[in-house]
Image (tube, rainbow, N blue to C red):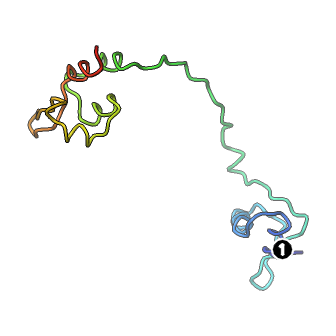
């Protein structure tokens, strides 16, 4: 019988891992003597039942999507885009769009006055 520290050192794992196994009951041969865990040196961890009830993970291949072009993204977008969306599509920072409102045609729209960029401005920048 060995201590938690000795068992961890023999296995090349951390003491915390051994203590987790003990708490989960994965080292069933281990015993506590006067408040200290004693583990048989050749004890192997056994996965508890909940692990065996899990469904095996299988990866299903996703259908290949064609690369999205700026033109295709704009075709799917509304007439006015948020500053965040416009900046992402143009490849610039939101700060650059906000700082250059006139250049990007930024206007206030809606009841709360949200800042938006007209889609036509993005098309002009992209030469579409």
Give the percent coordinates (x, y) of residue 93. 31, 39
Give the percent coordinates (x, y) of residue 101. 16, 36
**Residue at image location 72% in from the left, 45% down from the top:** 52
Q: Is residue 17 left or right of residue 109?
A: right
Give the percent coordinates (x, y) of residue 89. 33, 28
Quadrant of the rendered image containing residue 11: bottom right
Quadrant of the image for the C terminus? top left
Give the percent coordinates (x, y) of residue 64. 54, 18
At mark 1, the secondary structure is helix
**Residue at image location 69% in from the left, 68% down from the top:** 16
Please identify the residue farthest to the left as the structure is shown: 111
Quadrant of the rendered image containing residue 7: bottom right
- Reading the image, the residue beneath label 1 is 6
Quadrant of the image for the N terminus? bottom right
**Residue at image location 19% in from the left, 26% down from the top:** 80
In the foreground, 18 or 63: 63
In the foreground, 95 or 19: 95
**Residue at image location 80% in from the left, 68% down from the top:** 8
Please identify the residue farthest to the bottom as the structure is shown: 34
Quadrant of the rendered image containing residue 59: top right
């Amino acid at each position: 019988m060995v201590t938690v520290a000795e068992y961890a050192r023999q296995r090349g794992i951390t003491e915390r891992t051994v203590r987790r196994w003990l708490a989960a009951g994965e080292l069933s041969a281990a015993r506590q003597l006067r408040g200290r865990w004693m583990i048989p040196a050749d004890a192997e961890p056994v996965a508890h039942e909940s692990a065996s009830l899990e469904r095996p993970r299988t990866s299903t291949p996703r259908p290949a999507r064609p690369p999205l072009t700026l033109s295709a993204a704009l075709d799917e977008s509304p007439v006015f885009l948020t500053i965040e969306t416009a900046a992402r599509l143009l490849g610039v920072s939101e700060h650059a769009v906000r700082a250059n409102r006139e250049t990007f045609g930024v206007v206030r729209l809606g009841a709360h006055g949200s800042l938006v960029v007209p889609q036509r401005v993005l098309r002009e920048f992209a030469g579409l």
